[in-house]
Amino acid sequence: MSLRGRLTLVAAGVVAVVVAMAATATYFLMRHELYAQVDTSLAIHSSDRSQPFGEFSPYAGDSVAVIAPDGSVDNTQNIPLDRRILDVATGKTDGFFRNVQVTERASGQAVTLRERVQPLTPRGAVVVARNIDYIDHDLHRLWLILVLVALGGVGIAAGAGRVVSNAALAPVRRLTTAAERIAETGEPSERVPEGGRGELARLGASFNTMLGSLEESLETQRRFVADASHELRTPLTSLQTNIDVLRGKIELGPQQRRALLDDLHRESGEMRSLIGSLLELARSGAEPAREPFQLDDLIEDTLERARSRFPSVTWEAPVVEATVVDGDRDRMERAVWNLLENAGKWSGEGGTVEVALSGGELSVRDHGPGIDEEDRPLVFERFYRSAAARAMPGAGLGLSIVREVAEAHGGTVVAENAEGGGARFRLTLDGAARPGSLGGS
């Protein structure tokens, strides 16, 4: 059953229960009131002390029978007498009310009598009876009216519930329709109206926010695939060309063959680095492994690697404080290496790179040409390469990986031009770094 049908059924069910309870209460209250009126009238008649014994006369349509103290009975009006009445006449029990069925002498029809059996003083009893078939008739009519009213109320409640559910669930239907179209087309560019208030309006806004995020994610994915394909095509083409030359029929001298092999080695290295970067970016957004490690030791190890990779650059690390980081050591090592490699490439022959770790912040400063103002907002974008960087090896992924790793560890990274020239990158890990050593403070 649909949600709309369930809401309609619930509304009708609730109204049915309420109306049924109200109708039942009304019926029994009216029944009690009618019987109370009859009983009051019968009690007044049976206790009329202005009448001498044996001279009770019928009024208001009542029938009267008198039982004398000696047990003799004046019962000319066809009132049924039994042991209970005789017990009242002899003083054994108190008076009472009751309903009895009798057959009328004239019509032969069965009627219901309401009796009041009242003891007399010093002995004897009077029985006053009244035909109450009209009460049953009235109660039957009342019951039919209440049933019809209840059925009408349930019907109206069901209709109103359906109208209200249609109006209330209209935003849900729009969301459902939009979700179905997106599932068919695979394009999350559609949006649903966000008018109104309350939870459903918030649901629409949240749905649109989710669609926006999904659309952005798909666009990023498409751009990533396109950029990755473009970046992979260049080294693959170069590799294929060199391999074709080596396999060709042209005779190559030792130096030419050596040059081609060196090119193959360099291109394969760039391919390996590019694939590693792509794999690292594919992990972006994933929660990093949370294991404590010494960031200062990692930086010292990476500095040794940088000194070997860029022997003509002077690497200075005047301040490297003992710092523990809770995170993924391998990913952090990749980020630190990317910062050092970037600084080494831009320093050139005889350049100097200054590295410092203090207060949970890693600073890497080179003395190269610095960052152009138009390039600074884009240096952390995937595959972005400035005009000056296009002459250098690389795919434009190193700094974007640094940002991904920093954000995965609850940190940030910024790029700025340093005083006196050069660029400075500051990687801050306030959320994951703390001073000290794993072996002690």
Image (cartoon, rainbow, N blue to C red):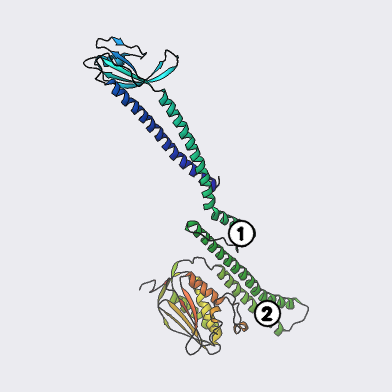
Residue 5 is situated, as x and y percent measured from the top left of the image, at 54, 45
SS type, badge 2: helix
Amino acid type, residue under disc 2 in the picture: Leu
Residue 33 is situated, as x and y percent measured from the top left of the image, at 36, 30
Mark 1 Cα shell of 10 Å, populated few (<14), some (14-19), many (≥20): some
> Which residue is at a point 43% across and 17% down the rendered structure image?
110
Q: Are marks 2 and 1 in contact (CB under 8 Å)?
A: no
Q: Is residue 240 visible?
A: yes
Spatial distance from mark 2 to mark 1, Cα to Cα?
A: 51 Å
Lower sequence index among marks 2 and 1: 1
> Which residue is at a point 55% across and 89% down the rendered structure image?
349
Tell me, for residue 261, which label it has, or none.
2
Is 199 situated above or below 100? below
Quadrant (top left, top right, bottom left, bottom right) of the N terminus? top right
Is 361 situated above or below 16? below
Is 3 situated above or below 440? above
Residue 230 is situated, as x and y percent measured from the top left of the image, at 65, 74
Quadrant (top left, top right, bottom left, bottom right) of the C terminus? bottom left
Q: Is residue 334 visible?
A: no
Frontmost residue, 333 versus 382? 382
Tell me, for residue 182, which label it has, or none.
1
Amino acid type, residue under disc 1 in the picture: Ile
Tell me, for residue 11, which label it has, or none.
none
Frontmost residue, 88 versus 107? 107
72 left or right, relative to 166: left
Residue 424 is situated, as x and y percent measured from the top left of the image, at 49, 83
Question: Mark 2 or 1, which is nearer the eye?
Answer: 1
